[in-house]
Image (spheres, rainbow, N blue to C red):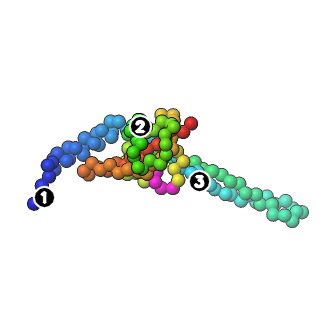
Amino acid sequence: MATSFLSNADKSWFDDSVDVWFETFKSKITIHKEPLKTISVLNNPNYGYEENTNLEQVEYTPRYGTYYAVVKYENPNDLENVPDIKTRFTNQIISIQVKQDARDYIKNDNTLKIEFEEKSFNIISNDVVRKYFDNIYYVFYLEETK
């Protein structure tokens, strides 16, 4: 017979506490993706000329999403042994803890940058799963761009 050190009520209380922690300390972040490229052909008939006079107009539409994350400024010395980080540190390193919807938006397509607090950051890690009983959060490490 399998037993647990925590009752279902304790687990539920812990899950609720994690949700309250996230809601209390969350910050709004903006995740920027590669812009959508739209090519329009403009017909510009120039009578008397035998060349193709159709002109192409290229338009870029920005794509971004706004989500919430808990932001933590990291001490670079503490991150030297984190295997998911792919670089050495010259700029400010932070971690963001996000919910599933933000994680999916970051992982889908190419993320150019993440902005908050009027600063811009690049992702330097894969997502790290943090599971708290029924709550799942994802952590990404970011490096400030200059």
In the image, residue 139 lies at what x, y percent?
Answer: 38, 46
Disc 1 residue type? Ala
Element carrying mark 1: loop
Query: Is disc 2 placed on a helix, strand or loop?
Result: helix
**What residue is shown at x 51% (from left), y 50% (from top)?**
111
Q: In the orientation shown, which residue stands out farthest toward the bottom?
A: 50
Q: Which residue is mark 3?
A: 36
Instruction: Give the magenta part as a residue range.
Output: 105-109
Foreground tag (2 vs 1): 2
Q: Secondary structure at mark 3?
A: strand
* Residue 2: assigned label: 1
With respect to residue 133, does 24 lie above or below? above
Measured from the top left, where is residue 8 in percent x and y? Answer: 16, 50
Q: Residue at point 51% right, 34% down?
A: 118
* Identity, as a three-letter code, of the amino acid under mark 3: Leu
| Mark-to-mark CA distance, 2 and 3 | 39 Å
Q: Nearer the viewer, residue 55 or 133?
A: 133
Q: Earlier in the sequence, mark 1 or mark 3?
A: 1
Crowding at mark 3 (Cα within 10 Å: few <14, some 14-19, many 20+) = few
Can residue 134 be seen?
A: yes
Mark 2 — residue?
A: 77
Q: Between marks 1 and 3, how big is the CA–CA gap?
A: 53 Å
Question: Residue at horizontal 53%, vertical 53%?
Answer: 110
Q: Amino acid at mark 2?
A: Asn
Q: Is residue 30 visible to us here?
A: no
